Image (cartoon, helix red, strand yellow):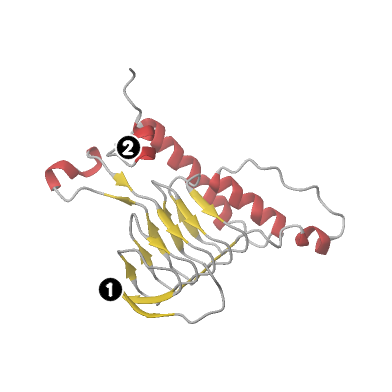
Amino acid sequence: MAEPTEKEKMERGELFIAFSPELQAERDRCKYAYIRFNEAGEVSRRRSVELWRDITNDKTPLPPVQSDPAADEALFQNEPWVEPPVRVDYGYNVKLDEGAFINSNAVFIDSCPITIGARTMFGPGVNLYSGGHPLDPALRNGLKGPEFGKPITIGEDCWLGGNVIVLPGVTIGKGCTIGAGSVVTKDVPAFHVAAGNPARIIRRIETTMTE
């Protein structure tokens, strides 16, 4: 049986070598894509969506161009909205559902899947780290050592304030609010407010929305 590649190890959540040729090439592809997105300047909604899909390596064809600019823009009203600049490692592990809003200076370390639910909103400077390094410095070994990853899942209708950090393996349930500057190290159940470093649950949110 063939030895698994470093990418296969990464996808399984096992220790992997990030500076293997395959993974370095994939990060380079993503880097050039997010640079194009960040430097695009004043572009149409269609072009912005196209550039974001280049980052995430989403090959889904765009709908046919409409002659009326307003009608063409309306075609993308349910697409996620991402404000530049943004930084992403691989891109293909970032999944944004309909109507998600990502404010400027977001960072996605997407060694493992990062999933963000519909209508969830980020303040500026939100950082999501699905990758990490071993605690033992002998094993960590700088650029020659292994990394690991754990998925991050953020439910629908959440609000993450500015400069929130979410660490590997965390799930934030539907309808949550995370206070600005918080570091989320553990799961947050649906419809709760959490804040602080490390983030702690403050209270439940009273709402007519259901899980």
Q: Viewer-proximal residue, 73 or 183?
A: 183
Image quadrant assignment for residue 169? bottom left
* Residue type highlighted by circle 2: Phe
* Residue type highlighted by circle 1: Asn
Element on which disc 2 rests: loop
Q: Among all residues in the image, which is located at the extreme top?
A: 1
Image quadrant assignment for residue 142? top left
Q: Which residue is mark 2?
A: 19
Query: Where residue 12 appears, x then y in whole percent?
Result: 36, 38
Q: Which residue is mark 1?
A: 197
Query: Where residue 118 appears, x then y in whole percent?
Result: 58, 62
Image quadrant assignment for residue 179? bottom left
Distance CA(mark 1)–CA(mark 2) = 31 Å
Earlier residue among tags 1 and 2: 2
Considering only vertical position in the picture, is 33 above or below 171? above
Position of residue 102 in the picture relative to residue 21 (left or right):
right
Q: Badge 1, how many Cα within 10 Å: few under 14, some, many 20+?
A: few
Considering only vertical position in the picture, is 3 above or below 54? above
Q: Among all residues in the image, which is located at the extreme right?
A: 67
Circle 1/circle 2 CB separation < 8 Å: no
Query: Where residue 101 appears, x then y in whole percent?
Result: 57, 66
